[in-house]
């Protein structure tokens, strides 16, 4: 596994941008009591499976330990899933950065996220014009808007 620090900002959006995304992926994220995440991304016809351990160090800064896993490993680990979230992720490449817009299924929720290799770059990031008027508020430090907590809430309401 390779451990990385990620620096991110997250924003609650009014709706998905009208601008066509560069790439769209359908994502299933499964969560476990030990903070592990299993994620299945579908981009076109290709499935990609990941095992991720993500720990929040402070608002906007996470330690992420991620590796690709096989389909068999994914389905074996899936049996331990406690809750999950389904979403469509829209990727918008702007300069050297990628904005990810998650549209959650079974929830009226759209979240934009930008990740940068350093805190300094993150603090200097400019909001693209196509997002500017869609942002309701920054939610980077609001734990209720983490995908894990959204999954917990959706799965409690769905049971």
Image: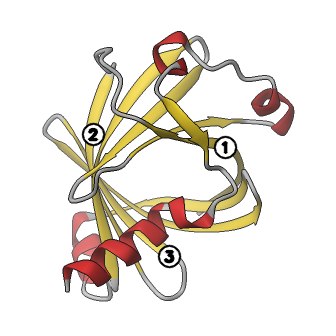
Tag 2 near tag 1, CB within 8 Å = no
- From the top left corner, tell me how far across and down residue 131 is, in percent: 49, 21
- From the top left corner, tell me how far across and down residue 18 is, in percent: 30, 18
Of 105 and 79, nearer the camera is: 105
Q: Earlier in the sequence, mark 3 or mark 1?
A: 1
Which mark is drawn over residue 152?
none
Task: Calculate the distance from the C-alpha at mark 2 to the C-alpha at mark 1.
Answer: 20 Å
Q: Is residue 144 visible?
A: yes
Q: Earlier in the sequence, mark 2 or mark 1?
A: 1
Position of 19 compared to 59: left or right? Answer: left
Position of 69 compared to 117: left or right? Answer: left
User: Which residue, given by chain and number where applicable, does mark 1 sit on?
Assistant: 8
Which residue is located at x 43 percent, y 22 percent? 92
Please, is residue 5 above or below residue 66 in the view?
above
Callout 3: 10 Å neighbours few (<14), some, many (20+)? some
Q: Quadrant of residue 97?
A: top right
Q: Earlier in the sequence, mark 2 or mark 3?
A: 2
Please, is residue 15 above or below residue 143 in the view?
above
Callout 2: 10 Å neighbours few (<14), some, many (20+)? some
User: Which residue, given by chain and number where applicable, does mark 3 sit on?
Assistant: 36
Please, which residue is most extreme toward the left here?
45
Please, is residue 154 above or below residue 127 in the view?
below
Task: Calculate the distance from the C-alpha at mark 3 to the C-alpha at mark 1.
Answer: 19 Å
Of 107 and 44, nearer the camera is: 107
Q: Secondary structure at mark 2?
A: strand
Mark 3 or 1: the one toward you:
1
Position of 106 compared to 51: left or right? Answer: left
Which residue is located at x 50 percent, y 76 percent? 36
User: Which residue, given by chain and number where applicable, does mark 2 sit on?
Assistant: 25
Q: Quadrant of residue 38?
A: bottom left
Mark 2 or 1: the one toward you:
1
Image quarter hosting the N terminus? bottom right
């Amino acid at each position: 596994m390779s451990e990385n620090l990620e620096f991110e900002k997250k924003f609650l959006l009014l709706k998905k941008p009208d601008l066509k995304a560069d790439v769209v992926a359908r994502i299933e994220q499964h969560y476990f009591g030990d903070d592990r995440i299993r994620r299945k991304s579908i981009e076109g016809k290709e499935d990609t499976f990941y095992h991720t351990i993500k720990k929040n160090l402070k608002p906007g800064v996470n330690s992420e330990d991620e590796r690709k896993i096989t389909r068999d490993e994914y389905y074996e680990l899936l049996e331990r899933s406690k809750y999950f979230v389904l979403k469509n992720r829209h990727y918008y490449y702007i300069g050297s950065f990628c904005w990810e817009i998650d549209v959650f299924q079974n929830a009226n929720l759209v979240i934009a996220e930008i990740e940068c290799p350093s805190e300094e770059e993150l603090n200097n990031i400019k909001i693209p014009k196509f997002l500017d008027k869609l942002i309701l508020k920054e939610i980077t430090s609001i734990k209720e808007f983490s995908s894990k907590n959204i999954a917990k809430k959706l799965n409690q309401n769905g049971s």
